[in-house]
Amino acid sequence: MAGNREFVNRRLHSLLGVIPIGVFLIQHLVVNHFITGGPESFNKASDFMGSLPFKIVLETVVIYLPLLYHAIYGLYIAFTATGNVNRFKTYRNWMYILQRITGVLTLIFIAWHVWQTRVAAAFGSEVSYDMMHDILSSPFMFVFYLVGILSAIFHFANGLWSFLVSWGITVSPRSQLISTYVTVGIFVVLSIISVQTLIAFAF
């Protein structure tokens, strides 16, 4: 019984990391990238997302609850699982370790980002270009956001590879090699988008 529960929890954890959390990550990065078209472009995109009907319900059901489960169970995995990097120094073993490290870094970043933006908005602040410019004009916060966002992107891209394997989508060594190239490509593309966004906000 415990084994079945563990199996279900891990599959659910993996699924939620891709849908809806991974989908939301991509959407969030794309919306933020509107800043490269100027402050007005970003403010319009931000206002549109903020004016969606049933926004609080959607955020709670589609984002916060899945993220909370994924984070809590992810911490359990991170602090109970053991890697074998010291015995087998392979690429995939290192990805396994980095997945756990970036998971913790991402959780810290998300908690702080939500505090700076969503919680601040609940107390009357406006989530706008001015808010993000004020945050990212600090060199420390710029580096903090850069590390946090890149950690989140890596965690998603590498987690997508694991999802494809654990759900039986990529079974053969060849399919897993192809998915490695695809997920690395996803990491690179989303990272470029994110760096462009951060630079546009800060400067």
Image: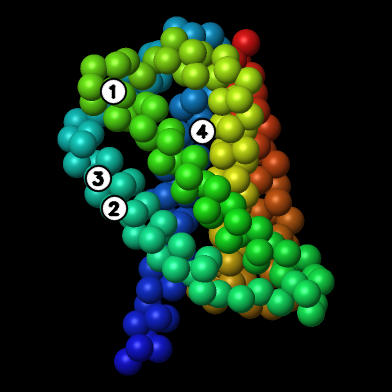
Cα distance between the residues tagged 2 and 1: 20 Å
How are the colours assigned in the image?
Answer: rainbow
Rendering quarter of residue 81:
bottom right
Secondary structure category for the residue under label 3: helix
Name the mark nearer the viewer: 1 or 3. Answer: 1
The residue type indicated by label 1 comes to Ala
Marked residue nearer the N-terminal end (2 or 4): 4
Query: Which circle, 2 or 1, is nearer the viewer?
Result: 1
Say which residue appears at 60% left-offset and 45% top-offset. 151
Look at mark 3 in the image and give the residue it sits on: 60
Image side of residue 118 versus residue 73, left or right? left
Q: Which residue was labeled with disc 1?
A: 121
Under tag 4, what secondary structure?
helix
Instruction: Using the numbered discs, state the Cα–Cα distance from disc 1 to disc 3 in whole angstroms.
Output: 16 Å
Cβ–Cβ below 8 Å for labels 2 and 1?
Answer: no
Residues at circles 2 and 3 in contact by the CB criterion of under 8 Å: yes
Q: Quadrant of residue 143?
A: top right
Residue 131, x across and y down, in percent: 42, 15
Circle 4: residue type: Leu
Q: Whole-percent x and y of residue 168?
A: 54, 76
Determine the CA span between mark 2 and mark 3: 6 Å
- Mark-to-mark CA distance, 3 and 4: 19 Å
Q: Which mark is residue 29?
A: 4
